[in-house]
């Protein structure tokens, strides 16, 4: 049960952060798709249905990767000004 709670917290964290990526960002469209997959996984977990470990790992890695890309994009835009 502890791993499930950890996964729920990570999914909620990623969803909150991905939601804040501006629509004009290069990664916005991809972030939208990953958010949809994360929401489906979250719904599944909250309903008490397990999400396969490889799928959960892939979703979490994708979420963090997109956050990193969005952060790099933001830094580049700040440095240009």
Image (spheres, helix red, strand yellow):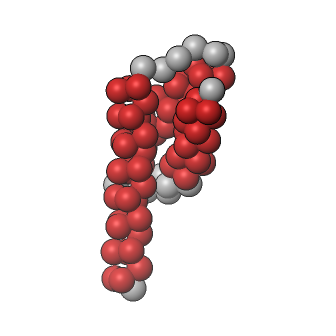
Total marks placed: 0
In the rendered image, the vertical position of residue 54 relative to residue 12, given as above or below: above
Whether residue 80 appears in this view of the structure is: yes
| Viewer-nearest residue: 14 or 57 | 57
- Residue 75: x, y in percent? 39, 74
In the rendered image, the vertical position of residue 1 relative to residue 29, given as above or below: above
Image quarter of residue 69? bottom left
Horizontal side of 5 relative to 62 (left or right) equals right
Image quarter of residue 12? top right
Horizontal side of 22 relative to 75 (left or right) equals right
- Residue 77: x, y in percent? 37, 74
Whether residue 12 appears in this view of the structure is: no
| Residue at image coords 66%, 23% | 46
- Residue 4: x, y in percent? 58, 29
Horizontal side of 30 relative to 43 (left or right) equals left
- Residue 6: x, y in percent? 58, 39
Image quarter of residue 7? top right
In the rendered image, the vertical position of residue 57 relative to residue 80, given as above or below: above
Horizontal side of 36 relative to 48 (left or right) equals left
| Viewer-nearest residue: 23 or 52 | 52
| Residue at image coords 36%, 83% | 79
| Viewer-nearest residue: 43 or 27 | 43
| Residue at image coords 42%, 20% | 52
- Quadrant in which the C terminus appears: bottom left
| Residue at image coords 35%, 26% | 54
- Quadrant in which the N terminus appears: top right
């Amino acid at each position: 049960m502890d791993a499930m709670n950890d996964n729920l917290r990570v999914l909620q964290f990623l969803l909150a952060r991905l939601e804040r990526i501006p629509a004009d960002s290069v990664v916005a469209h991809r972030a939208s798709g990953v958010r949809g997959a994360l929401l489906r996984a979250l719904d599944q977990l909250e309903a008490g249905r397990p999400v396969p470990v490889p799928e959960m790992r892939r979703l979490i890695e994708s979420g963090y990767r997109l956050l990193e890309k969005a952060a790099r994009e933001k830094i580049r835009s700040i440095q240009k000004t």
